[in-house]
Amino acid sequence: MAVNPLDSAPLSESDSNTTANTRASSGELSSALLTRYAGPCPRYTSYPTADRFTDLSAGSATAAGADARKPWDALQDINTLSLYVHIPFCRSLCYFCACNKVITQQYGLASSYLDRVLTEAQWYREKVARVPVTQLHLGGGTPTYLNDGDLTRLVQGLGDIFDLNPGGDVEYSVEADPRVLEPETLDTLRGLGFNRLSMGIQDFNPEVQRAINRICSPEQVRGLTEAARERGFGSISYDLIYGLPGQDVASLERTIDTVVELAPDRIALYHYAHLPHRFKAQRLISSDLIPPPQAKIDMQLAATRRLTDAGYQFLGMDHFARPDDPLARATKDGRLARNFQGYTLMPADALVGLGASAISYSRDGYWQNHHGQKEYATAIGERGEAICRGWQLDTDDRVRQWVIMELMCHLRLDKREVERRLGSPFEDYFAQDLARLRPLVADGLVLESREDLVVSERGRWFLRNIAAAFDRHLHAGASAAQYSRVL
């Protein structure tokens, strides 16, 4: 049975033999501590989380009436903008993947989809203030499934509608599958202004790769990493996963050693969530091959030691970076932010998400497109947009959103600043939340004083659990079992 991290009891008597000083400040992790908080929990790329969204289609009536202000109306009142484009197409199926994807060899489907994305972008022309786009991200699926001509058509089409100015301090990033990425495409991407590249590695062990149907050699990744650096990509990141079928500590350590040798600027080390009842592709993985919980904990500890010993800085959640990487410097300087792509140093006043299942946000709330290709295509053809659900933020949501992002990005919460925003005493307003936080304080994951809450060094591993204490919607009766486990 999954452990609910927020219902965890305080330390047992045997645990309490550890000195208070060590519990409060040490970055050390133990299997017992990791097990205690390993249950399902949101990732908080937004607050409220996307599973709370309700009907909010552009043409629908709401409880407040069809003429009520919608979250996208606030796009007229921004100074900076982020853009996200979801490209769902892949050439082959990776069994572990839980993304919104389409597996096809029929390239015409992707080209037609791109037509609809640009039609949707056109819908935003009169709704978005003409402000600089500080961040552009292509996600998927496999964005580099698009040929070079269509990649160029996409970015140039976006430039006709939005204020794209590549270079300087802006961040243009793209997710890539190293099995199919060609050096010529890197030339195209750099010419379009892309300066960040993320490659999905997952694991270099051949047996694990066969179990997840994703075969990729270190030599392929090395060649692309060197080619990207030669072309001026300023930051290269690898995605790794632990807990995959057939993995063990020794095999993961070998993968980490190879990754360290390749020296990416950033590393995301994700926990594999095996949810075959939700994701059909995962039913192709034998559950007997999934490592048990203790083995996953041992893998996480071993991988973390390997990466930090190699000089990577642990930023929090699943992210590591070289000390000279801009993301690490932003963490040190208190400039780290978070959005649907994870941690970022390029926060914007709003994000416009284009494509099937894409999520957008403004200061007033969130809105999401239809998930299915058919529904997305029909909506774009009929209305020029595909909004199906979302969330209008109220005052309480805004305060809790700020609280959660402060803890996850800056690792500190100034109680007096919260009171200034609330107009009421912190301890009174968040009495129930602080009660849920007490076990984490007892375990030394959060340090509490009269002035603030501070995430300890080892508390960085449990940011999801810490944030969840302040999630009003999570504790309103809905089950947490629908979320991925922390471990």
Image (cartoon, rainbow, N blue to C red):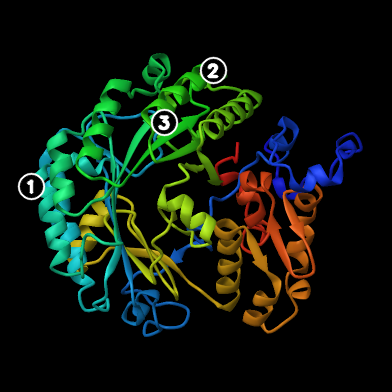
Residue 306 coordinates in the image, percent (x, y): 54, 28
According to the picture, the residue beneath numbered tag 2 turns out to be 288
Residue 395 coordinates in the image, percent (x, y): 57, 78
Answer above or below: position of 122 versus 440: below
Answer above or below: position of 140 versus 340: above
> Is there any visible trace of residue 106 in the rendered image?
no
Instruction: Please state, as top left, top right, bottom left or bottom right, where the C terminus lies in the image.
Output: top right
- 396 sits to left or right of 115: right
- 97 sits to left or right of 379: right
Mark pair 3, 1: CA separation: 30 Å
Q: Nearer the viewer, mark 3 or mark 2?
A: 3
Residue type at numbered disc 2: Asp
Answer above or below: position of 300 versus 351: above
- Residue at image coords 56%, 46%: 482
Crowding at mark 2 (Cα within 10 Å: few <14, some 14-19, many 20+): few
Answer above or below: position of 295 versus 71: above
Q: How many marks?
A: 3
According to the picture, the residue beneath numbered tag 1 turns out to be 149
| Residue 454, image quadrant | bottom right
> Is there any visible trace of residue 300 in the rendered image?
yes
- Residue at image coords 77%, 60%: 448
Residue 203 coordinates in the image, percent (x, y): 42, 25
Residue type at numbered disc 1: Gly
According to the picture, the residue beneath numbered tag 3 turns out to be 96
- Residue at image coords 70%, 45%: 4
Mark pair 1, 2: CA separation: 44 Å
**Residue at the limit of the structure toward the top, as seen here:** 207
